[in-house]
Amino acid sequence: MTRFAFATWDGGGNVPPAIGIAQELLSRGHDVAFIGYEVQRQRLEAKGYSFSVLPRSGQFDIYSTSVPAERLQGLLANVWASAEHLEDIPDTVAATSADVLIVDFSLQGALASMARLTVPSAVLAHSAIAGLVPPPESPVGQARLAASNRLRDGAGLPVLARLNEAWAGCLTLVATIPELDPAAADADPSMHYIGPVFERFPQEQWDSPWALDDDRHMVLVSFSTTGLWDQSGRIRNTLEALADEPLRVLVSASESIELGSVPGNATIRRFVPHERVLPSVAATVTHAGHGTVSASLAHRVPVVALPNAAADQPFLAAMLQKLGAGIALDGEAEPAAIRTAVKAVMGQPSYLAAAGRLAEAISSAPGAAGAADELERLAAAGRGRGRHRASVQALRADH
């Protein structure tokens, strides 16, 4: 049995793929722990995982402010480029007796700390690299690169020209398909595109409010449930757009969202596993997070994207449109535009065909099983290096 530890943070779509891989590792008899921030503890411990808070940086609360500039500075200093991770990660890896560490791609301090570790380590990127890594000339890219290079310079490490140079040559699991990521064309051999990885919910059921013989098409309205974004406006616009259409509208939304009156053809649920409903869905309206996009495509469902102006969402929305599997709208699109787009992706066969092609690519990807295979190989190689070091030390002692 090997003990794997995931170093992560509460960034929304980055956590479910880590959990999906953890579930696969557990099914193979391994042990899994998570390392991160106090705000994550309840969620991960409720799922049965042991959880360790980073001793110096782990009390930071990304939800403590809603002011964009303050939130960005907090994320830079405490998550994305935390100099405290240089000590936090090695200390926590030792305290948890981890044999292998898997680091979220965005944690530059944790990536820098890998040089100090005696255990093998890997990197997990939950979406397309071309969408996840901001261009160095963009405002966010400049800020993240500058902060990352400050901590690296302080640690005596080479500075980066781009953020993804931090994991060059390291086993990197990219949880998407090359078709969604232009960066795959020039990817280093150490990068493995394993395809989307979904958290499994074997105990969760979907209790539909509609009659079994209701043959109206179903539209899934699924937006980010993380507190980083207020999705209420997008959901209200979508409900208004579809209110008078002969459709069943399922909205997956946080209980804290204020939506006002809900049309008669819609129902609101706090959480419904995608795998339970997508086989019956004709179109998805979403913020274009990778989890919802890839789950929809895996079930051959075309997408209408209303992205938030950050992370990989605008990129994925544009890719969907480029590949013909969806329509990208402005995140604040009016109901009329949303209505037109939903009718188009349901009514024009080309969208369904494009979604089907991407579904085939997702189906043939290695997925969580492939990720676990790579991590087991990494663990075995690490044990081999450990035995070699022990043999060398013993030989030197004898002489």
Image (cartoon, helix red, strand yellow):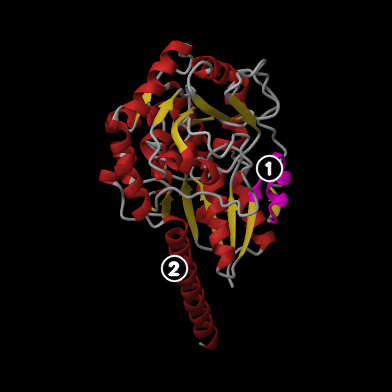
Residue type, numbered disc 2: Arg
The picture places residue 234, in percent across and down from the top left corner, at 54, 19
Please indicate whether residue 191 sits to the left or right of residue 331 in the image.
Answer: left
In the rendered view of the protein, which quadrant contains the N terminus? bottom right
Q: Is residue 231 left or right of residue 194?
A: right
Neighbour class for label 2 at 10 Å: few (<14), some, many (≥20)? few
Measuring 43% from the left and 52% from the top, which residue is drawn there?
173
The residue pinned by badge 2 equals 377
Is residue 117 in view from this perspective? no
The residue under label 1 is 40
Badge 1: residue crowd in 10 Å (few <14, some 14–19, many ≥20):
many
Left or right side of 159 for 30: right
| Residue 352 x, y percent position in the rendering | 32, 35
Question: What mark, if any, has residue 391 been given in the picture?
Answer: none
Mark 2 / mark 1, whichever is N-terminal: 1
Q: Position of residue 304 (x, y in %)?
A: 41, 26
Residue 236 occupies which quadrant of the picture?
Answer: top right
Look at the numbered disc 1 and give the secondary structure of its residue. Answer: helix
Rendering coords of residue 97 (x, y %):
65, 64
Quarter of the rendering containing residue 137? top left
Residue reaching furthest to the bottom: 398
Q: Residue at x 48, y 28 (%)?
A: 286
Q: Is residue 234 magenta?
A: no
Q: How many marks?
A: 2
Q: Which residues are magenta?
A: 35-48
Under tag 2, what secondary structure? Answer: helix
Mark-to-mark CA distance, 2 and 1: 29 Å
Could you say which is closer to the camera, residue 386 or residue 304?
304
Q: Looking at numbered disc 1 in the image, what kind of residue is underneath it?
A: Gln
In the picture shown, does residue 277 fall above or below 306?
Answer: below
